[in-house]
Image (spheres, helix red, strand yellow):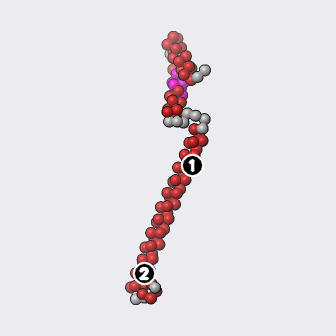
Amino acid sequence: MTREEMLARLIAQADSEGSDLVTLRAIVEESSEVGAARALARLGLGDEGAQDDIDELRELLSAWRQAKASAWKAAVEWLVRGVLALLLVGIAVRLGMPGLLK
């Protein structure tokens, strides 16, 4: 029996026998399962390979974050090295040692 059939039977039961708490909870649970399955299908994640796709996307996102952090770190390191080199050149010029710059 599919979830849609189960939901239809529960609704019919609630209509004919009245709706007690157990029936209402079952209706809510089944309808949420059907809705979740529809939402995943609309996103293209309703097949068997969807979990693998999600895992690959998570790995890709993690790699992107690591690469971005490494790029920022490298950029800051180069900036600091450049500033320090300019500082040393300034000190050498100030002390009158232009021969050191050649």
Report the residue at 53% width, 27% height from top: 34
Q: Which residue is mark 2?
A: 89
**68 up-or-down from 86: above or below:** above
**86 up-or-down from 96: above or below:** above
* Mark 1 and mark 2 residues within 8 Å of each other at the beta carbon: no
Q: Is residue 90 left or right of residue 19?
A: left
How far apart marks 1 and 2 lie (CA) works out to: 45 Å
| Badge 1 amino acid | Glu
Report the residue at 39% width, 85% height from top: 94
**76 up-or-down from 6: above or below:** below
**Mark 1 packing: few (<14 Cα in 10 Å), some, or many (20+)?**
few
Question: Which residue sits furthest top?
Answer: 16
Of the 4 image quadrants, the one containing the N terminus is: top right
Q: Is residue 30 magenta?
A: yes
Report the residue at 53% width, 14% height from top: 13
Q: Which residue is mark 1?
A: 59
Earlier residue among tags 1 and 2: 1
Q: Secondary structure at mark 1?
A: helix
Q: Position of residue 101 (x, y in %)?
A: 45, 84
Q: Secondary structure at mark 2?
A: helix
**95 up-or-down from 20: above or below:** below
Q: Quadrant of residue 82?
A: bottom left
| Badge 2 amino acid | Val
Report the residue at 45% width, 70% height from top: 80
Q: Which mark is residue 28?
A: none
Query: Bounds of the magenta span?
Result: 27-33
